[in-house]
Image (tube, coloured by chain):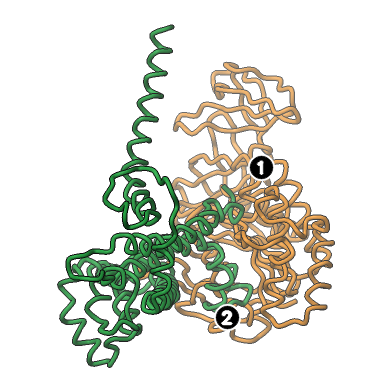
Amino acid sequence: MSLRMLKSILLKIGFWALVAVLVLYAVFPFYYAVVTSLKPSSELFEVSYWVDSIDFFNYAAVLSQPTFLAAIRNSVLVAVSVVIIALLLGLTAAWALGRVRFRGRTMVMMIVLGVSMFPQVAVLSGLFEVIRTLDLYNSPGGLILSYTIFTLPFTVWILTTFMRQLPDELEEAAIVDGASPWITLTKVFMPLLWPAMVTTGLLAFIAAWNEFLFALTFTLTDTQRTVPVAIALISGGSQYELPWGPIMAASVIVTVPLVVLVVIFQRRIVSGLTAGAVKG
Amino acid sequence: MASVTLEKVNKRFGSTRVIEDVSLDISDGEFVVFVGPSGCGKSTLLRLIAGLESITHGDLMIDDTRVNNMTPPERGIGMVFQSYALYPHMSVYDNIAFGLKLAKSDRQTVDERVRQTAKILQLDGLLDRLPKALSGGQRQRVAIGRAMAREPRILLFDEPLSNLDAALRVQTRNEIAHLHERLGATMIYVTHDQVEAMTLADRIVVLNEGHVEQTGSPRELYERPGSRFVAGFIGSPKMNFLTVKARREGGAGCRISVPGMGEHVLSRQLNSDSEGGAVTLGVRPEHLKPVAATGAVGFNILNVEYLGSEAYLYLETPDGEPLVCRTEAPSAFARGERVTLDFAPHQAHLFDHEGRALPPVDASEARVSATMS
């Protein structure tokens, strides 16, 4: 009896200890960034895990730079465009791949998956030529194009998987009701695919928002840069000084939108939305 | 309201023939039930009529117009699916209104039709609910409402009751019968349950392996099955079959002798194949009268099933498959007793070795049974 109680208590302690380790591991870097960003530069190299005095000087410094504001604008433009294009193409492709029976469907799915297996560096030079040819160098268009290439495969795969789970009779009911494929897709399937679309959209947004290599390679001037590159290129008064304070402040600023998005949309990521469509 | 005509309709999936040369005339306002075991192609046939599958060969006409290449709404059909297939994110109102809105009806007509449909199906109070907040029977009614709101010429039902429990099934069955009377629409109904077929149909189409086995009113199929397959499928418990030897008996048909059942003269014509050979005798459980056995011949009673209004005796036979015999309840017999069986010759059926029913001897008897149905 007492042995069993002891065991359950120990198990509970062990469980929460593991949770604590995980949370610490995941959150600490970000927490330290926040703490650093709130310190005046004079205290920067004193190691402390708590903020004694809050100082918003770093934030003011970052936000007063017009190049940083332009970078945020570019990032928003690129990320939102990538999400919209990826979801639109992904949804229509998922309808075709998940709902229409045609020869070579599995082949197409495999090719789509294959595309996403190339590392970025492998396609960098080729993509550079493509972007030069299309006259998209040093413009958001070039980034939207290249990000979409890497975002579409998983968007298509996830949405196709979800699309296949929707009952066939639902589509047939819509056909009997006189719905065209487009109406069926937008009025019947899309509301049921909301959870999947939110998830993939969020992943696409985060990928586009955080991307560094393409953003560095395909842009040239400060006005066209996105946030990750802009932060990396924040420089101090001399080549021997790294302005950690402003860099951390900028990092916190660009992380906040992601956190907000996840918090807003996590409520929409609900399962069981198809409950009631069919018996069971 | 519309008539439906199928002319030598064929359907193939790859190299498998699912529907073979089905020809059928369904007249305006008729309630036709497709019935058959699973895999017989009844659902496929319904989907061909609906326009959800394409016809490989043959013509489908609705009101004398060839509709092979028309979409379901152009054909003017409404369909109720087995799984209901309600749009889960839409309220009952929107589910019913969906087709009407797509048909570009103005808002007032849509509203009028939806409310009228809801009233007929007693869904008035549920219009704002989502499908997940409805019971099985209510969902089924919404599915029917969605199918009939556009006032289609033909209503199709694909096993609509198979997901309901027994009590609700009887109730919904009655509602569908009532609805047919009220709307007067042509209805085609698919089921594997012969009770549904018998109770609902003006005419039953029995399908077997992709072809039409027999069509006719429930009574015709019950009393004069054209084949052993139909005889075994219609009626519950199913008809008893025994392999017997038959001899031609003058002009009066044929004589058969069954151990434990005595000798009978049946007015059935033996064809050249079955003359002297083995034929199958079919007698329904309700037409067998058990009599307590006196001699050595007879059947052992394996089991007695008591159902309140009636009882079934299961009798041991030499070839394994037990005979079933219906008696009034409580039964006068108990397990382990021996009985002989008697039946009226006109209630017995004979089938040749290919399963075809042997025809009555003279036309006069055919006429008698024709007037009966």
Mark 2 residue type: Thr
Crowd rating for badge 2 (residues with CA inside 10 Å; few <14, some 14–19, many 20+): some
Q: What residue does disc 2 label?
A: B71
Which chain is depicted green?
A
Instruction: Work out whether residue A273 or residue B113 is closer to the camera in this orientation and state it.
Output: A273
x%, y% of residue B344? Answer: 69, 40
Left or right for B345, reference A126: right
- Chain ID of residue with mark 2: B
Asked whether the viewer can see residue A112, the reply is no
Q: Quadrant of residue A118?
A: bottom left
- Does residue B346 appear to the left or right of A194 in the view shown? right
Q: Quadrant of the N terminus of chain A?
A: top left
Secondary structure under the numbered disc 2 in the rendered image: loop
Q: Position of residue A253 (x, y in %)?
A: 42, 63
Relative to A258, say whether B302 is above or below: above
Task: Answer left or right for B11 relative to B239.
Answer: left
Q: Label 1 is placed on what type of residue?
A: Asp
- At label 1, counting other C-alpha atoms closer than 10 Å, the crowd grade (few under 14, some 14-19, many 20 or more) is few
Q: Chain B's shade in the image?
A: orange
Q: Looking at the picture, does residue A268 appear above or below residue B66?
A: above
In depth, the one of B57 and A268 nearer the eye is: A268
Q: Position of residue B104 (x, y in %)?
A: 71, 83
Q: Residue at x 55, y 68 (%)?
A: A172
Instruction: Describe the element under mark 1 as helix, strand or loop.
Output: loop
Name the residue rendered at 36%, 30% in the picture: A17
The numbered dot on residue B165 is 1
Which callout, 1 or 2, points at the residue further toward the start of the chain? 2
Please tell me which residue is depicted at 67% across the width and 70% down the height of the picture: B78
Using the numbered discs, state the Cα–Cα distance from disc 1 to disc 2 in whole angstroms. Answer: 34 Å
**Chain of the residue where label 1 is placed in the rendered structure:** B
Q: Is residue B104 above or below residue A263?
A: below
